[in-house]
Amino acid sequence: MKMVRLLATGVLVSLAAAGIAFGDAAPDPLNSGLAPSARTHHIWMADEEVNIHLGEETVSVDATFRFANLSEKKTTLEVGFPTDYRDDVEDLEVFVNGKNVTYRETKEKLYYPETIDEDGITVNWALWDMTFPGKSETKLNVSYKVRPRKNHDFIITPYRNFIEKIETDMPQEPPADSTVGRLLAGMETFSTGYILVTGSGWYGSIGEAIINVFYEAKGPGVIRWFHPEEDYEFLPDRLQWKFYSLDPTFNIQLEFNPSFTVDEEISLVTEALGSDSKNQGLKDLLLFLRDLKEKKK
């Protein structure tokens, strides 16, 4: 019986350590880290569907993977899922072909020359064994919750950068109940994402990957920044990416504002400009929001 260690991909922290949800399954976690390269097996990820439900307190993730063993012989792999990468994952559950799997936990240190973490990054892994019968398919379901990163004043994103520009162009601090006051108070955002690169360790390209992002209360209009800006579509109830024959070299990242949809914020900024027409920060924000609205068509 062949034993190979594989890693599960996951939601990660985006926008410079944002609250990223961990995700996909991929090979040799303890030897390959978060971006595996060696492929010593013939287990192909035929498809995956990931559903991410945004929230201010927690982001819930449910991921389904379908694997095909392209070889004649059964293969047993140790599959790993990163449960702590600068963030915590809670309520992790793993099902293989519908049966709940008990996982074990271990830790490792990862060192990246380009980072400022001289002491390395501690990654906690949830590990379990999966047996893939020859010439057959195996289904894996992983679900968990992760806390998104709250973007405070010291964390500047392209969207939140407009706050300082608006305030700089104002002669005095606006009343809290004014249009501008309500706008500035509502420009609080959260960041999260999903790690795809760990899926590169499976045999061949990922056949199909569908990533859905939901925000139940207001829909996808709360999203203020997303990456990548390709192979995506804004549907009435979600932001959706569809990738085919995917060799993942990037991760899903996004920023969202639960206070307003883009349309709601455009109306608020337009109203604010009615009483402060010379405020360049408001003008620039309006252009940013209108451009974002065009990307959602």
Image (cartoon, rainbow, N blue to C red):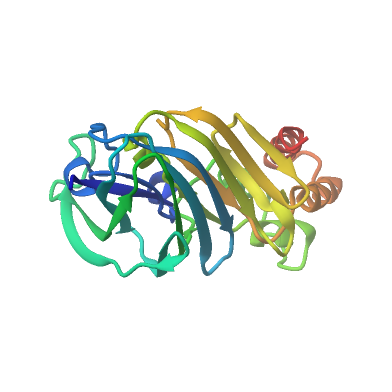
Which quarter of the picture shows residue 184?
Answer: bottom right
- In the displayed orientation, state which residue is furthest to the left: 119
The residue shown at (80%, 53%) is 264
Viewer-nearest residue: 148 or 74: 74
Report the side of 174 relative to 125 (left or right).
right
Report the side of 274 relative to 240 (left or right).
right
Residue 75: % across, % down: 27, 45
Which quarter of the picture shows residue 112?
Answer: top left
Which quarter of the picture shows residue 4?
Answer: top left
The residue shown at (14%, 46%) is 118
Residue 232 sits above or below residue 163 on the image = above
Residue 156 seen from this side: yes
Residue 33 sits above or below residue 257 on the image = above
Viewer-nearest residue: 19 or 260: 19
Quadrant for the C terminus, please. Answer: top right
Residue 276 sits above or below residue 143 on the image = above
Viewer-nearest residue: 218 or 53: 53
Residue 186: % across, % down: 67, 60
The residue shown at (72%, 50%) is 221
Residue 169 seen from this side: no
Number of marks present in the image shown: 0
The residue shown at (56%, 33%) is 243
Residue 153: % across, % down: 49, 56
